[in-house]
Image: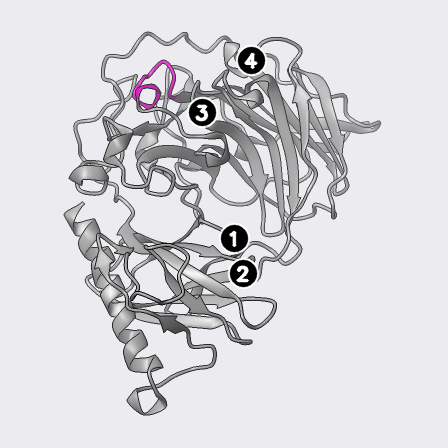
Amino acid sequence: MATYRRFRLTFLVALLYAFLVNGSSEKDGPSFPGEARLIGEWTAFEGRIVSVPEGSPQLSAGSVKVELGKEGAKLRGAFACLTPGTAYVFSLRLKTDKPVDLVLSVESVPIFASAVDNDTANVGRFVAHTSTETLEIALYGSEEGYCVYLEEISVFPVCAIQAPNPCFNYDGQNMTCCPSGCGPNDGPLATCADPDPPPVTPSPTAAAPEEHVPPPPADYRWVVNRALTDEFNGDSLDRSKWQPIIPYYSGRLPSQYSTANVAVGGGYARLTSTTAVTNVNQVADPYNDPWISAAALASNSPIASLGFYETRMKASNLLMPSSFWFQSVHTETDVTETIGNSANFRSRYMPINTHYYPTGRGPSQTGDLTTPYFYRLPTGTITSDFHVYGFWWQSPTKLQFYFDGQLAATITPKAPFTEASYLFFDTEVFKQYGLPDVASLKDPSMNVFLVDYVRAYALVPAKK
């Protein structure tokens, strides 16, 4: 944690210095359109902007005001002491009277872009290429005179994978854990799986491949798409098909994905969520500081397209979603984003949604056109047993969703879904529903999202 604080402090000092040199006057150094005008002084204390001179406009005691001109506002700072090849998270919290467009960039390459509003944590991930990188914050409003209050700027490393290590999963398979120093109180971000957990019920004999597959159209037949099919009956992840991370996204704070939390054993892929803290009071800002270690499983490339996909899975019993979904540049299909904890209403539903991003994910993203639908479970809650979730990508304008072999919904997305997509399983925090408690995050009977299998099928002309 001491290293984490030094990173944050160094960045704040460097950012302030860059602004004072480059933004004070033209003769003092280079400037550029939209340079931010900061009212007040910045004081760094454990990475937080904590004081503004008495009488300066401010929203709260810990914020600094930035006024947006008609060309917006930008701040730049050279951040030193980076380790080349290491992944870092660039995080910014702010408050604003009106929504603004925020772009976070590293060496002029955008790593986060979105319309943002009050008190949100906005996070971009980058890999350092040199020991010093130039970081930039750009803010834009629809009209001149917007005010934005910077609450916190931080940069911290994403824990690296190290091997060998003493951690083992439920089958005795070697696992990798985050090294110490990355998590709260100088501890690891991820904890290791219990070496002697409760016994796991073996996966049942695989059902006939067509058990839950809907009848094909006339003159067509289903064939297995082996590139996206896996029974997870081995003792390690098939890296020819899957990666234990989402390649362009690290999860929603306060959770962050860790490759150490994905394993295969006992007939399942296991996605574990955990924490290194013993009490949430150890975390300065539980909703925005990264103290929950989550998990994601992704196809190696975006190759999912028209066809039928199904998985048999059991959600964790946490106040975190267990999700099966697909995403491309412009489209996203959420087959289910259920929350297993019975205290949350989502535990009694199969929450389905599609997203269309008109300008695509990334720096130019504007708009998110959705089609949310909640299918009520016939009985019980989602964690009472395994369930089979199906998705028939029938055409660019017709998507069908299945629960335990029964049609749950037919949805027409807001625009044709034509792009090949990544296939994802993941678990992360949806903080609008609250946070999981520390005890459940450390309980192996509650904190594991189990995937029995995923099967993919494509339509081909029937043989005459």
Judged by depth in the image, the label closer to the viewer, 1 or 4, is 1
Whichever of callouts 3 and 1 sits on the residue coming sooner in the sequence is 1
Q: Tell me the element at label 3.
A: loop
* Identity of the residue drawn at 21% across and 36% down: 188
Whichever of callouts 2 and 1 sits on the residue coming sooner in the sequence is 2
Whichever of callouts 4 and 2 sits on the residue coming sooner in the sequence is 2
Instruction: Read off the residue under disc 3.
Output: 319
Instruction: Read off the residue under disc 4.
Output: 381
Viewer can see residue 83: no
Q: Position of residue 219 (x, y in %)?
A: 83, 29
Q: The residue under label 4 is which amino acid type?
A: Thr
Q: CA distance from mark 2 to mark 1?
A: 7 Å
Marks 2/1 in contact by CB < 8 Å: the verdict is yes
Quarter location, residue 295: top left
Magenta extent: 439-447
Q: Is residue 368 left or right of residue 432?
A: right
Instruction: Read off the residue under disc 1.
Output: 117
Q: Tell me the element at label 1.
A: loop
Residue 61 covered by magenta stretch: no
Q: CA distance from mark 3 to mark 4?
A: 13 Å
Instruction: Read off the residue under disc 2.
Output: 100
> Dot 1 surroundings within 10 Å: few (below 14), some, or many (20 or more)?
some
